[in-house]
Amino acid sequence: MNYYQEEVECAPRGAIRGIQSERLSAVIRRVYDSVAPYRKKMDEKGVKPEDIKSADDLHKLPFTTKDDLKDAYPYGFLAVPLKDAVRIQSTSGTTGKRVVAFFTRHDLDIWEDCCARAVVAAGGTDEDVVQVSYGYGLFTGGPGLNGGSHRVGSLTLPMSSGNTERQLQFMCDLSATILCCTPSYAAFLAETIVAQGLRDQIKLKAGIFGAEAWSEEMRRDIEKTIGIKAYDIYGLTEISGPGVSFECSEQTGMHINEDHFIAEIIDPATGEVLPYGSKGEIVFTCITKDAFPLIRYRTRDICVLSAEPCSCGRTLAKMSRLMGRSDDMLIIRGVNVFPSQIEAALMSRGLSSNYQIIVDRVNHTDTFEVQVEMTPEMFSDTVSGVSAHEDELTAAMRSMLGISPKVRLVSPKSITRSEGKAVRVIDKRKI
């Protein structure tokens, strides 16, 4: 079994907790003294730095939200003198102010180490060719995996997203062995590889896919189509980008880099901390970042935490794959619906990962439609056969969700492909 930093990745649980306690106490003192919004939040809650003696005291601290960061844009949460910051990354926010995250040189070193752990966990070595097809620029995906690949010593192809023909040319000509991109783009590349008859020309052995929720069914479909092992990776710009957690060869959850981040699961409605094994919103506290150490940051991502031993040998706690988000959850006719539930229902029946959910409101009543591409076999079927497939899918979703969508099977390749994050939901309601 290969590790990038075995002394940390395989440390005893007690040692990890000790590291977290020491680092948490230090960072709380620092942000209280240097970050006005944190000082105000802690004062309002009646918490002083000396009250945080160990990681067991984390629950005493206030939460931080994306709205807090937007309200303090751009420098309000910067915890070091501006001259010490050497990089920014930013969210891809569609409305209002963006969130700008700052990095010192030390922060970049930590980030690259975290991503290097992910590359090695996926089988990467200094003999591999890593094709990074995440976006670069302000988006964290490209820079993060680029840095991690460099740390490992792999030849790195900084492709960025898009320009699929060039992606495939370099993938074949330079014998890329590890692909890094969003899962929806990986599915598109896999589909294109097969369509262009390139399956025997690629040398890929693994993929590191993240930046959006995806199902186990989608993973297996990608793996089968191009003959790779697909690894999940998690991160978010506010915390550091990819590398907050990563999947090992067991593919049973993503190991959290707990020497840098403390994870909690909370009830998204009440903020109550839940025990391991509970489904809830994951919250992260940065304990080693200099420039932008967020405290109890509410990610809005829904998952489950586990500290069960992993057969890979790593002792770092694991988070499950994302089960949706508490803030992009759809409420349709009073029912909570996550796109990931719909994807699982579709792909478990052999359908495409290319689908869209369209929600509208007509005469004060929500309408709910799921469009999904047919397989080539279905496309050649009779009208009555297609209708029967639609009825079957409707019944399956009614059973899973407790609500019946209108399922519409559309022709293959008719839904617009994505070279970045897939647009899964179109909500036309004026709510």
Image: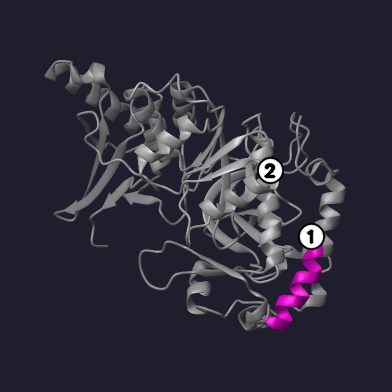
Q: Is residue 187 left or right of residue 256?
A: left
In the figure, 133 relative to 429: above or below? above
Q: Earlier in the sequence, mark 2 or mark 1?
A: 1
- Residue 192 position, x and y percent, is 35, 30
Q: Is residue 288 left or right of residue 37?
A: right
Residue depth check, mark 2 versus mark 1: number of the one nearer the observer: 2
Q: Amino acid at mark 2?
A: Gly
Front residue (pair 14, 153): 153
Front residue (pair 4, 31): 4
Principal secondary structure, stretch drawn in magenta? helix
Label of residue 213 in the image: none
Q: Is residue 262 left or right of residue 144?
A: right
Q: Residue at x 54, y 60 (%)?
A: 237
Q: Residue at x 40, y 29 (%)?
A: 190
What is the residue that sits farthest to the front in this orientation? 173
Q: For residue 32: magenta?
A: yes
Q: Which residues are magenta?
A: 23-34
Q: Secondary structure at mark 2?
A: loop
Q: Quadrant of the C terminus?
A: bottom left
In the figure, 8 relative to 28: above or below? above
Is residue 318 at least partly visible in the picture?
no
Q: Is residue 224 left or right of residue 259?
A: left
Q: Residue at x 38, y 42 (%)?
A: 339
Front residue (pair 141, 12): 141
Marks 2 and 1, how far apart at CA? 38 Å
Which of the 4 image quarters holds residue 191?
top left
Neighbourhood count class around disc 1 (C-alpha, 10 Å): few under 14, some 14–19, many 20 upward: few
Q: Amino acid at mark 1?
A: Asp
Label of residue 153 in the image: 2
Label of residue 56 in the image: 1
- Residue 139 position, x and y percent, is 48, 58
Q: Quadrant of the N terminus?
A: top right
